[in-house]
Image (cartoon, rainbow, N blue to C red):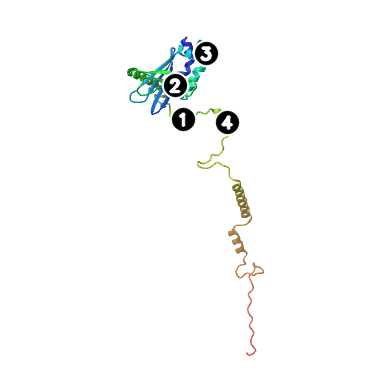
Amino acid sequence: MSTDVLSHFGVLDELIQVIYQGLDRFVVLSQVTESAWSIYLGLKGPEGRWWRGSWSAKHIINITNGVQSGPQVLENFAEKLRTTFVNGDLTIGEWTEKDSDINLTFGPAAKHPLRMALKELPPAEAASHATAVFTEIALQAQSRKCQLNPPFSSRNVTVISESSHANSASTLPSKRTPLGLSQDPVPAVNQAAERKIKALEAELARSKERSPPGDMISKSSANSRPPKGASLANPNKKARKYQVLEFESDED
């Protein structure tokens, strides 16, 4: 009977959560066996205090309306507890530093919150449980080459499937934008000015192609000048020299 009931509580096995309450910090561990669902609560501090509470199959059936609880009811109940646990919707009830009997409250703001009674473990049993927890952590770390925590890359890098990567690649821009530059579209005024500048540059290039270079103009003008002593009418012939005629005066 107990095995059938607790088989629906597998979603609550090996869960861990941290609770901040005032200045205190607690760690909560959830464990499911064939006979009970157990909660272990540890207080961070020099004393190393631990508490434990559990619900048997009979207790779970009483909470879920007796023997009429079917598999679907048990699964829904376990899933609701798991969601509450994962979301951290937990508080420590009746907590003072001197009290040894406290409770773990699921959904404290709910209309009907659930409370599991916790009893403090003797120091020797608390130390034994802490050692068992670290042993389990060490066994799991062997698959990570004995690293206590998973590698940084596997914890922070999201793996993208090839298909989604291919789909997203088509939507990416073909050119990368330099860091620090805005990707906003260029205003229309700037686009018009850029078009005018390009048109002027093209017109200047065409005018340079039509007109000969300056040194060629200067050479052609220099070549067009007749050589010294050449005839202006016919540059290929030498100019005639005219001798000034002198007339004798009547007095002589």
Mark 3 is surrounded, within 10 Å at the Cα level, by few (under 14), some (14 to 19) or many (20 or more) other residues, namely few
Q: Nearer the viewer, residue 144 or 105?
A: 105
Disc nearest the viewer among 4 and 3: 3
For marks 4 and 2 on the same chain, the one whose residue lies earlier in the sequence: 2
Distance between mark 1 and mark 2 Cα atoms: 32 Å
Mark 3 highlights which residue? 71
Q: Secondary structure at mark 2?
A: strand
Disc number lying in front (1 or 2): 2
Q: CA distance from mark 4 to mark 2?
A: 46 Å
Closer to the chain start, of discs 4 and 3, is 3
Helix, strand or loop at disc 1? helix
Q: Which mark is residue 156?
A: 1
Q: Nearer the viewer, residue 175 or 155?
A: 155
Quarter of the rendering containing residue 150: top left
- Let me know if residue 133 appears in the view: yes
Is residue 109 positioned above or below 73 on the image?
below
Q: Which residue is mark 4?
A: 167
The mark lying in front, picked from 4 and 2, is: 2
At x 32% / y 18%, what residue is drawn?
124
* Label 4 crowd (10 A; few <14 / some 14-19 / many >=20): few
Could you tell me if the residues under marks 1 and 4 are in contact, i.e. CB atoms within 8 Å? Answer: no
Sequence-first tag of 1 and 4: 1
Place of residue 167 in the rendered image (x, y in percent of width and height, measured from the top left): 57, 31
Residues at marks 1 and 2 touching, judged by CB atoms closer than 8 Å: no
The label number, if any, that marks residue 241 in the structure image: none
Q: Nearer the viewer, mark 1 or mark 4?
A: 1
**Relative to residue 248, is residue 193 depicted above or below?**
above
In percent of width and height, residue 204 lies at: 61, 53
Give x and y (percent) for residue 68.
52, 11
Label 2, on which residue?
A: 105
Residue 195 or residue 119, whichever sits in front: 119
